Amino acid sequence: MSRIMRLVNGENGDSHKVQIIKECPECGSTNIIRDYKRGELVCADCGLVVTEKIIDERPEWRAFTKEEKWKKRRIGPPITSTIHDKGLSTVIDWRGRDAHGKKLKFKKRMEIIRWRKWQMRTRIYSSLDRNLAQAMGELDRIGAQLGLPRNVREEAATIYRKSVEKGLVRGRSIEAVMAASIYAACRIKKIPRTIDEIARFTRSKRKDIARCYRLLLRKVDVKVPLVNAEEYIPRIASDLGLSGKVQGRAVEILRAAKVAQLTAGKDPSGLAAASLYIATLLENERRTQKEIANAAKVTEVTIRNRYKDLVRKLNIKLPS
C-alpha cells in the first residue's frame, strides 16, 4: 500500500507524523474517497473502510466568492479577549527546536532566548498592556480554580476591558476589579458562583469585590439578571450525591416559595440549601444541616431560618 508521511503540528504544539494513504490495501485502487461527515477514508471500488477517525483539515468557514474567501482566510487561532493583545501578536516558541523538530545547538538556543526576552518586552510595552497582562493572568488562574467554561472567561475579559476604558481600575486593585468582572460574567451566563467562592481564590477581601461589582453595575453597560436560587440546586446536590428526585422536589419548593413571594431579599444559596434539606426529609434521603451547609457554603443558622419560613408559610408536612 502506497503511503506518504507528513509532519504536522498538534494542538499542544508537538510535531507528529500522519500517514496519507494513496491506494486501497485490498484491491490496490487509487480511487479513495475522504468522507469527512463519517470521518473515514473509503475505497470507491471495493467499499473497504481504509481508515477511521480522520481529521478534517478544511476551514470551519464557507466562502462563495474569491473575494470572500480571501477576506476570511487566516492563520492561527481566532481572536480572544482573554489575552491582553487578543492573540494577535507573534510568539517565539520556548522549546528550542527547529521546524523539523530537531534540537538547536546551545549557542543558537541562547540567542533565541534573548530574542524571546526582547519580544516579550515589546509585547507588553505600555502601562495598559501591563495592566491587561496582569489581569488576564489573574483571570486564567481564578477561572482554572473555579472550573469556569470558556464563554464565562471571555465575558469576564470583555467586562474588564470596558472597565479599563472607563478608567475604573485606576486607584483600585486589579484583582478586585477582575474578581468583580468574573462574578458579573457568572451572573450573566447563569453559572452559580458566589462572591465568597471567588474571594477565596484572590487576595482581595469580599467587601472590596462587592464594592467593585456595584461600581461595574453603575458605570459599565452590563445587564446582570437576578439570581435564581434554582441554579444552585444541581451543584449542591451533586456535592451531596442526592438523586434527581430530591432535586426535582427542591425545585418545586422554590417555585412555590417564589409564587408566595418568600424569596425576595433572601440569599439564593441559602434558599437552595433549605429547600434541599426539606426535600431530603420528604424523599427519605436524609442529610444533616451541617453537610448541606458545607456544600452550599452557608451557615447552619441560615438553613434553619429559611427552613422554618418555608415549612411554616408553605404548609409543608414533614414525616415524623
Image: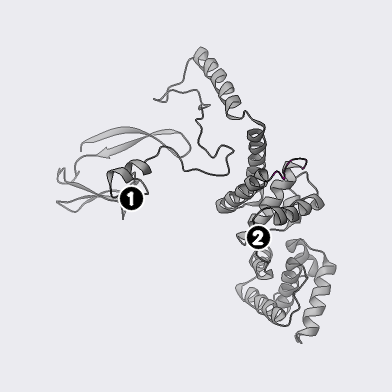
Residue type at the position of mark 1: Arg
Quadrant location of residue 130? top right
Q: Which residues are magenta?
A: 167-172
Residue type at the position of mark 2: Arg
Residue named by callout 1: 62
Q: Secondary structure at mark 2?
A: helix
Indicate whether 283 appears above or below 111.
Answer: below
Give the left or right position of residue 163, taking residue 95 as reference: right
Quadrant location of residue 296? bottom right
Q: Residue 156 location, x and y as percent?
A: 63, 50
Q: Secondary structure at mark 1?
A: loop
Tell me if mark 2 has few (under 14), some (14-19) or many (20+) residues whose alpha carbon lies within 10 angstroms of its own: many
Membership of 73 in magenta stretch: no
Q: Residue 136 location, x and y as percent?
A: 63, 41
- Residue at 53 percent across and 15 percent down: it is 111
- Residue at 73 percent across and 78 percent down: it is 281
Which one is earlier in the sequence, the residue at label 2 or at label 1?
1
Whether residue 140 is visible, yes or no, is yes
Residue named by callout 2: 187
Give the left or right position of residue 88, taking residue 84 as reference: left
Q: In this orientation, which residue lies closer to the viewer: 304 or 198?
A: 198
Tell me if mark 1 has few (under 14), some (14-19) or many (20+) residues whose alpha carbon lies within 10 angstroms of its own: few
Residue positioned most to the right: 301
